[in-house]
Image: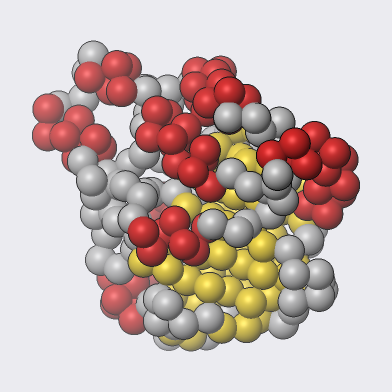
Amino acid sequence: MRISVLGSGSSGNSIFLQAGNTRLLVDAGFSGRSLAKRLSTIGVEAENIDAIVVTHEHGDHTSGIGVYARRYGTPLYMTQGTQEACSKLFKGQETVLTYNPGRSFHVGDARVEPFLTVHDAVDPVGVAIVDECTGLRVGVATDLGRPTSQIRHALSDCDFLVLEANHDEVLLHTSNYPVSVKRRIASSHGHLSNQAAARFAVELMHPRLAGIVLAHLSKECNSGDLALKVVGGALKEAGWSGYLDVAEQNHPTALLDIEDLRYREGPAQLSLI
């Protein structure tokens, strides 16, 4: 199972994931040309994507879905509410398949398990994706106002996580954002702070968790170094020493082999048992 966060932040989000012979995108918040370029950077041809799983309708997650679907014939998977909210992006030539949160569905070798999240969108979801060939499990939870018991359960047994660490609480409070925007971001339907992400990551820690990528960082109210310091410090104090990185807005992360990460990090993680 392989994964690369193609880019993440307020200007666009997309994640590439390969399970067996199946290649997926989770969201497509960049132009079709940009997505193709980002995929090429990690050695993947844009026409070889088998499906795009859409988590919610916000433009930084959906701006490229219509163009990409028409250009490459790639099917789109989303909830009915998200489809209706994205209707202006479609011209009737796309293949759109709807799913229900809480009910898994298959795309080739991948089992997709969507779950409800808490965010100010019409029908927001996170996803866990399982490689049916190996049993490896990846959880994706960005645009997350607060963890719930359902979200904790969905992400509790993942081998790899893409987890939001959107802002530093002090930097948000002292930023030039209008008060209404600050309240929205910090609300239970907004975004996770570094501090909240650190607490959540520690909750999700277990011996088989090989890696975490922190995503959806705010350009104005956060930095990669700060997110790594806060989240990485909490995980280290709790005894975890797996792979930890930050997704950038303008460049894909490395294409990571999760099984290889588990092999490399295995001896250190056994100390958690």
Above or below: residue 170 compared with residue 4: above
Count how many numbered circles sit on residues in the image: 0
Quadrant where the C terminus sits is top right
- Using residue 256 as the reference point, say whether residue 167 is left or right of it: left
| In front of the other: 48 or 103 | 103
In the displayed image of the protein, which residue is found farthest to the front? Answer: 273
Considering every residue shown, the one lying at the far left of the view is 180
- Residue at image coords 52%, 38%: 202
Say above or below: 124 vs 184: below
Pinpoint residue 104: horizontal percent, then vertical percent: 53, 81
Q: Quadrant of residue 109?
A: bottom right
Q: Position of residue 76 (x, y in %)?
A: 52, 76
Confirm whether residue 157 shows in the render.
yes
Q: How is the image coloured?
A: secondary structure
Residue placed at 83% from the left, 54% from the top?
A: 259
**On-image quarter of the N terminus:** bottom right
Q: Is residue 28 visible?
A: no
Specify whether 120 is left or right of 40: left
Residue 234: image location, x then y, percent: 53, 26
Q: Is residue 227 above or below residue 186?
A: above
Q: Quadrant of residue 52?
A: bottom right
Residue at 14%, 27% in the rendered image: 178
Answer left or right for 90 relative to 208: left
Residue in front for this viewpoint, 50 or 138 = 138
Say which residue appears at 44% left-offset and 56% top-offset: 152
